[in-house]
Image (cartoon, rainbow, N blue to C red):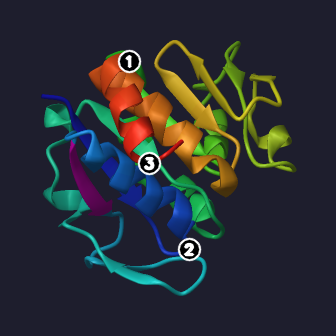
Amino acid sequence: MKKVSVLLANGFEEIEALGTIDILRRAEIQVQTVSIHSHREVTGAHQIQVTAEKVFEEVDFSQVDVLVLPGGMPGAKNLNEHEGVKRVLKDFAAQDKYIAAICAAPMVLGGLNLLDGKKATCYPGFEPELIGAKITDKPVVTDGKIITGKGPGLVFDFALDLVEKIAGIATRQEVQEGLLL
């Protein structure tokens, strides 16, 4: 079974993180929430506090198949400034593992040149941060093992695309129908 880690930084976009986690778990995909801070408590961009299941240093990322980076500000900026996050993202790219980022978070991938020559999308205004990317206006874009989403209102599209990549189209359709989408 595929294992997903959702990286949470103070200032994360709650809808993107929690919506994605919820949809992946509805698909019975193993998801762990990971605080990039030294403590499990993480506060979202709209002051919603969550308790992550692990802190970054506790996670063996070699046992993880998919990384998810929610956007939000300053959450995406905090992800971008975390050296461990950047190291793990480079490792995932080198191992051809899935990396998914939504809203402002694709800027982290752009700064690492992981979008070079790839199609990608992001929250309007962050396009200059997607260094080397071929920017599209689509809600969700998959190019190789990189999945990018435009923003909070498109979390269902983003998370369901992840479900499809991880568990197949039949599981996606089942979850989608259960959500009345």
- For label 3, the residue is 179
Task: State the residue in front, 174 or 141.
Answer: 174
Left or right of 5? Residue 78 is: right
- For label 1, the residue is 169
| 168 versus 103 height, above or below | above
| 143 versus 17 height, above or below | above
Q: Amino acid at mark 1?
A: Ile
Q: At which x and y percent is residue 2? A: 19, 30
Quadrant in which the C terminus appears: top right
Q: Residues within 10 Å of mark 1 (few under 14, many from 20)?
A: some
Instruction: For marks 2 and 1, give the one nearer the viewer.
Output: 1
Q: Residue 89's image quarter?
A: top left
Q: Amino acid at mark 3?
A: Leu
Instruction: For marks 3 and 2, give the one nearer the viewer.
Output: 3
Q: Amino acid at mark 2?
A: Gly
- How many marks overall? 3
- Of labels 3 and 2, earlier in sequence is 2
Left or right of 110? Residue 54 is: left
- Of labels 2 and 1, earlier in sequence is 2
| Magenta stretch bounds | 30-34
